[in-house]
Structure formats: structure tokens, C-alpha cells
Amino acid sequence: MESRIERIKKQLHNAKYKLTPQREATVSVLLEHEEDHLSAEDVYLLVKDKSPEIGLATVYRTLELLTELKVVDKINFGDGVSRFDLRQEGAAHFHHHLVCIECGAVDEIQEDLLGDVEQIVEDRWNFRIKDHRLTFHGICSRCSEGNEEKESE
Amino acid sequence: MESRIERIKKQLHNAKYKLTPQREATVSVLLEHEEDHLSAEDVYLLVKDKSPEIGLATVYRTLELLTELKVVDKINFGDGVSRFDLRQEGAAHFHHHLVCIECGAVDEIQEDLLGDVEQIVEDRWNFRIKDHRLTFHGICSRCSEGNEEKESE
DNA sequence: ATATTAACGACAATCATTACAATATGATAA
DNA sequence: TTATCATATTGTAATGATTGTCGTTAATAT
């Protein structure tokens, strides 16, 4: 965990940015909430616990910066806000999401799964893929438990 | 094309909604711009050509209604606005998009391609998929033409 | 320790979207 | 046909997320 921040610090420096205390606090909040999909406001509130003087604009600027450096990914699940999600270290592509339309939970799929599909798209559409976004909407395992009725389509 | 509107009219009626002139004008704009990915504002400006008295709020409400009826899908490519895209008639799932990071063009992929992936997700994560969103970001065929350098990864 | 310059914080401004309140429309029952 | 009632519409105000501004602060190299 310590080394994770160190590496992010190096990434910042390589791109000529500084790791200020505010940025460090923001990154550490993101690391502590790796499972979640926090909005900028969420991050702001959490960072304020560590650095009460921090401004909302700074959080926005930091998140934008981290997005640019591909440390986080900015995602949008259709509610009004952008959410920020740490990218797995070294991951070439963004991971996928399962959004439950019952309870709203968001789970992550780290596996790529899209290898074949991407090959087809590259070949058939002559499109050079750099990244992707894949989100499934449906009923999560927790919500369908208990509702053991198999719908016959 | 005439029948397409008729069928949408029936869908509205089945759901206890009326096809008012404003709604008809909005739908017809969407049909005429099936290839595009219009924002609410875009739709509003185009509808105003046919029905100058229409209000922006009505366009928003109509788009919301059509989204609810799955006549259109609301998508978000990360710029600040929601965009609306006619669903292929009878399509169970939403089609995919190719967003060019050079020129900003958005192309559509009507083929499903995700059959195998969805099966894996349903089985491994016990998630009952209802819909999906898949967008690839990269360089479109038009932009890579001329730049015939094959990057050696 | 100081200079340079990026970064900050507070707040104003912007932009998309939604809420509201008054009016209009259109179907139905008398 | 006309009164009635529910739904739809309009213009505008309100909201809420995000971005811009600007004077101040602090990180980094010397």
C-alpha cells in the first residue's frame, strides 16, 4: 500500500506534477475505497476528514489529473454524477461493471473477457481499439437469491 | 417509415400515453437522424424547425418517456451531455459504439458479439443480464487511413 | 532561505437537467 | 354540443454538478 502511493507519486513526477498533501490525501482516500465507485462529492467529503481545509475544486482538479494519468477511470452509470474508479496497476484496459437494477450495487469484473470481441472489431471495422467501457445491467446474485423462480424467458 | 411511427404510436398507447403533435415531431426528428447521437439540446433545436412553439422541457420529457418505453436509449460518452439513440426495432439489447478519440466520430455496431461473454458473466457471477453498454474508444478507420504506420505494439 | 511557479481555496459562473405553476388540449359523459 | 376532468405543454425559475477566476500559499530547486 505504501509502495502503491510511491508509484503514483513517480507517475505524477514523470508528468511534471507534484504530489501535494491534498493530492496525497485524495489518492489515499481512493486507495481506501478501492471497492467503491465514489463521486467527486463523495471523495471530497471523505478527504475532508483528513484535510479539512481542502476545497472542492481541488478535489475535482486532482481527479481530473488522475484521470489524465490513467490512475483512475471516470465512469458514468447514468445518474447525474461522474464516478471515479482506481485502475488496477498495470492494467491495459478498464475493468467491467455489473450494475444491479434492483439494489443499485456495482460489482467489478477484473477479467478481460473481451479479447475475441476486440479482435473481431479491429478486423471487421478496421478500428484500432485503445480502451473500452462495458457495463451490464441486470439482477445481481444477492437480489435473485430467495427469488428462486427461474423465468422461462 | 410511416409504419415505424405507427408502431411507436401503438407502443405509447399500450402504455397509456398519447402521441401528441410535439411527441410526433420529436420522434420524427429521431427517425430522420437515426445515424446520429443527438443530445437533448440537439433534438430540441431540430424539432423547433417543425414545431417552433415547442418547449425544451417537453423535449426532455418526451425523451425520458421514449427511454422508458425502450424506443430510444440514453447514452453518455463522457462529455457533459446525455445522448439519445433509437433502438433497432425489436432488438433485445442495445447496440455498441465505436468512439474515435481523434475525430470524435461515433459509429455503431448492430451485431451482438457479446453472446459468449454474457453467458460467462451469467454463469460465473450469477448475474441475470437485462441489458448492456459497450463502447470502444480508439482510432477509426478514416483516421488511421493515410497514417499507414503499423505500430509494433 | 529564497525565488519561481504550480497548486490552492473560496466563491462566482456556467451548463445540463428538473421542478413548478399556470394554461391549453382532448376525450368523455350528460 | 357543452361541461368536466385528466393529461400535456410552456416559459421560467430552481437545482446541482462541474469549471473558471483570482488573490494567496506552499513545493521544489538552487
Image (tube, coloured by chain):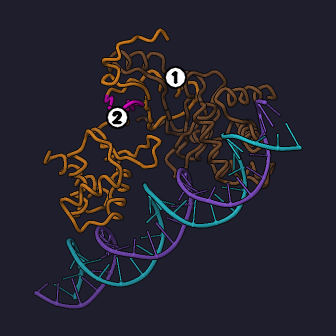
Chain colours: A brown, B orange, C cyan, D purple
Tell me if I can see residue B91 in this picture: yes
Residue at x-position 39% and y-position 30%: B102
Q: How many residues crowd mark 1 within 10 Å: few (<14), some (14–19), many (20+)?
A: some
* Rendered-image quadrant of the N terminus of chain B: top left
Q: Is residue A148 magenta?
A: no
Q: Secondary structure at mark 2?
A: strand
Q: Is residue C15 above or below residue B105?
A: below
What's the residue type where badge 1 is placed? Ile
The numbered mark at residue A32 is: none
Q: Chain of mark 1?
A: B
The numbered mark at residue B120 is: 1
Q: Is residue A116 above or below residue D3?
A: above
Q: Is residue B105 magenta?
A: yes
Q: Nearer the viewer, residue A26 or B4?
A: A26
Q: Chain of mark 2?
A: B
Which x, y percent locates residue A88?
A: 65, 26
The residue beneath circle 2 is B106
What's the residue type where badge 2 is placed? Val
Q: Which residues are magenta?
A: B95-110
Which x, y percent locates residue B90?
A: 28, 38
